[in-house]
Each structure stands twice: as C-alpha cells, then as structure tokens.
Image: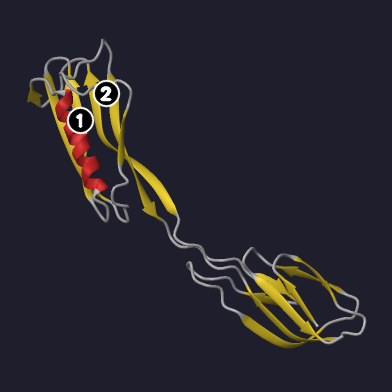
Amino acid sequence: MTATFTSSGTWTAPASTTMVDSLVGKGSNGGAAPLLSASTTVATVFWYIGSGGTNSGNYDWASATNSAISQRNAINAGGSPSYTFYNISQHSNNTYTVATAGYSLSGVVAGSATIVYETGWLSSGNIVGGGSSQNWSATVSWNYYGSPTNGSDSTALGYTFAGGISGGVAPTSTHYNIAVTPGNGYPIVVPPGGSVTINYYQ
C-alpha cells in the first residue's frame, strides 16, 4: 500500500501494520533570488541665513539638478557603480559651499534607477529660501537581487527531509524498515512543493 502526502496531514497506521517498508520524501525547493529595492539621497541643498560659505556667489538649481541626475545615471548603469553625494549649502550673504563624498554599490539592476525630488526643489534659478533655514533633497531608488532562499523541510515518522539550499532543488531521500504502532496517528508535515510517500504492507 502507498500513502502520498503533498500537504501536511496525519497518517494512521492500519491495525495490521507494524512496519513501514520505505519512507520517501523531500522538502520544498529553494526560492530564486528576490528582486528588492533600495534608495539613497544623492544631493541635499541647504539654505542658511547669514554667512558661512567658502565660495562667493549664488549656487543655482540647474547645477544641483544636473549633479543629482548624473548620480542617477551612474547608478542606472547597473552592476557595481560608484556615485557621489553632494551637500550644497547656500548662504543668504551670497556665499556657498559644495561638499562631496563618494560611495559604491553592488548588484544594481541596470536601467532600474529613478530619481525623486523633495517638494520645493527647483530646476532653475538661484538657490534662495525664505527668512529661515530650509533644505531639500534628491533621492535615487534602484532594484537589486537579494540572496536565493532555502526551502522548508518535510518531516514524517521521526525523519526530516531537507528543502533545497540557496535556490536549489530539494533532494529526495529514502528510509527503510521503520517500526510503527498499529492504530497510531503520525503527523506528517509537508510544505508547498514537498512530498512524503509511505510504502507499507497491510
């Protein structure tokens, strides 16, 4: 006789069965690497009241926007891109400072990068705020692949059948001559995609 489980349940040993001839099973397969998303700020613009800039003049929104777009384009190339973060400070006494820092990414999906500007970010004109300090940012988002996942195990009659590792196919294994008690119910745990087959004499 054969009893096959493709989902969890209970197997009850028949009244005349004291031994399972063979127990065959496998867990679920591992999962493919999931597509995930991430984001980072590539440019921040500050408006300060008073002095403090290291350069004379007014920094303009077009330059800030072009800097942000250049970083989006660098990330959009995919793979392991490098990009530059821009910290732009404009002061009301017509001085400004531009500070930069370099960063690297890995596993970026080419063509997936997009850019979003915080409300108040402009595309042209000098950077000018109101009577108090303000700031605006440009953020780039992109996709990347995470790590493949492991499958879940199946269990039956005291044995464990492994799931697939790191996205791999679950192996099938067999155990022989397993003693059981007639009339007893045995829990069978089977994840989606797994299976357990009990071969026995009745």
Residue under pointer 2 = 121
Relative image position of residue 194 (x, y in whole percent): 64, 69
- Locate residue 136, reporting x and y percent: 29, 25
Name the image quarter holding the N terminus.
bottom right
Secondary structure of the residue carrying tag 1 is helix
Q: What residue do we see at 56% from left, 66% from top? A: 151
Q: Is residue 84 visible?
A: no
Q: Is residue 6 shown above or below 108? A: below
Question: Residue 42's quadrant in the figure?
Answer: top left
Across and down, in percent, residue 180 comes to 83, 82
Q: Secondary structure at mark 2?
A: loop
Q: Amino acid at mark 2?
A: Trp
In this view, 77 is above or below 70: below
CA gap, disc 2 and disc 1: 9 Å
Task: From the viewer's perspective, tell me whether residue 41 is left or right of residue 179.
Answer: left
Residue that appears at 22% across and 19% down? 48
Is residue 55 shown left or right of residue 159? left
Pointers 2 and 1 in contact (CB under 8 A)?
yes
* Residue 17 position (above or below residue 70): below
Report the amino acid beneath label 1. Answer: Thr
**Quick one: quadrant of the C terminus?**
bottom right
Q: Nearer the viewer, residue 112 or 160?
A: 112
Residue for badge 1: 65
Would you say 181 lies left or right of 167 here?
A: right
**Label placed on residue 93:** none
Classed neighbour count for the residue bearing mark 2: other residues with Cα under 10 Å, few (<14), some (14–19), many (≥20)? some
Sequence-wise, the earlier of marks 2 and 1 is 1
Which x, y percent locates residue 171?
57, 77
Q: Which image quarter: residue 61?
A: top left
